[in-house]
Image (cartoon, rainbow, N blue to C red):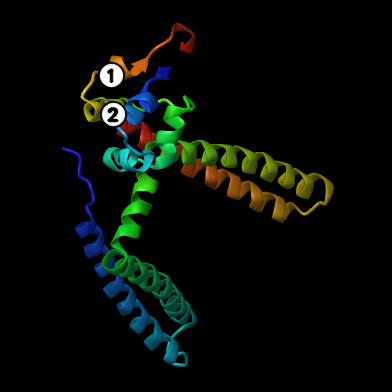
């Protein structure tokens, strides 16, 4: 699963630390999400979507080969 | 509704732990000092009470100290502990460690029984393996019901 987290975060001039604090996760989790090494839980995905004021589908891109 | 322990709840629990620990320490110390008047079992119990109180008082006092004077540091630690990725990593690491330990203990028990002829040691290891597996099974059942 791909995501636009890094792009959206940088566009808003938000640091990984600040995003992590706002989402109540560790900075490492943000880093892993951005690197595509970790897929978030549905709760965290909703939190991220709410933080950026977007829908989950606009941030996370599901690809068939993930199945 | 899901109940979640807040920092205040944890502080209260740590406070209770501290009081219980102090009581155990006093009780244990009284028993230890009356060594000649009490039976061996009671004396052993006193020793155990004193040792447990040490761990309880130290653990609870440390938590209270951090909650009061190092609140930010404690909040960060809690965040790291509850972080979903960290929880996943811990779970997977624990399962891997469990599997590796079981295989190694199994091999060790076989060596003790079949090669070295130390049956008691071998069966003790088997006992540890059975207990660990039982605990794992119970914990798994509880988790399955919760999720």
On the same chain, marks 1 and 2? The answer is yes
In this rendered view, identify the residue nearer to me: B63 or B19.
Answer: B63
Residue B138 in view (yes/no):
no
Vertical comparison of B66 with B47: above or below: above
Vertical comparison of A41 with B18: above or below: above
Q: Quadrant of residue A21?
A: top left
The CA span between labels 1 and 2 is 8 Å
Judging by the rendered image, the residue that carries numbered circle 2 is: A48
Look at the numbered discs 1 and 2 and tell me whether their residues touch, using CB distance below 8 Å.
yes
Vertical comparison of B23 with B87: above or below: below
Q: Residue at x 36, y 37 (%)?
A: B142
Judging by the rendered image, the residue that carries numbered circle 1 is: A56
Q: Estimate the x, y position of residue A59 in percent, counting from the top left.
A: 32, 19
Could you say whether the residue bearing mark 2 is in a helix, strand or loop? helix
Residue B76 numbered tag: none
Q: Residue at x 67, y 50 (%)?
A: B123
The quadrant in which the N terminus of chain A is found is top left
Q: Which chain is mark 2 on? A: A
Q: Estimate the x, y position of residue A20 in percent, counting from the top left.
A: 34, 40
Q: Estimate the x, y position of residue B54 in percent, counting from the top left.
A: 42, 75
Count of marks, rendered view: 2
Neighbour tally class for label 1: few under 14, some 14-19, many 20 plus, Cα within 10 Å: some
């Amino acid at each position: 699963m791909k995501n636009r987290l890094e792009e959206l975060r940088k566009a808003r001039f938000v640091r990984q630390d600040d995003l992590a604090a706002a989402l109540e996760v560790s900075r490492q989790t943000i880093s892993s999400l951005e690197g595509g090494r970790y897929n978030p839980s549905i709760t965290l995905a909703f939190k991220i979507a709410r933080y950026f004021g977007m829908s989950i589908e606009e941030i996370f891109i599901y690809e068939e080969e993930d199945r | 509704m899901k109940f979640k322990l807040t920092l205040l709840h944890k502080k209260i629990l740590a406070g209770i732990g501290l009081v219980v620990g102090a009581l155990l320490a006093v009780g244990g110390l009284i028993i230890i000092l009356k060594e000649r008047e009490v039976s061996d079992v009671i004396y052993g119990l006193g020793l155990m009470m004193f040792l447990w109180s040490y761990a309880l008082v130290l653990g609870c006092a440390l938590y209270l100290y951090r909650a009061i004077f190092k609140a930010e540091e404690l909040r960060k630690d809690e965040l790291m502990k509850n972080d979903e990725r960290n929880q996943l990593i811990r779970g997977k690491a624990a399962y891997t460690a469990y599997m590796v330990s079981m295989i190694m203990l199994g091999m060790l028990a076989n060596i003790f029984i079949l090669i070295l002829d130390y049956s008691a040691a071998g069966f003790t290891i088997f006992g540890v393996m059975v207990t660990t597996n039982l605990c794992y099974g119970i914990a798994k059942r509880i988790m399955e019901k919760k999720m």
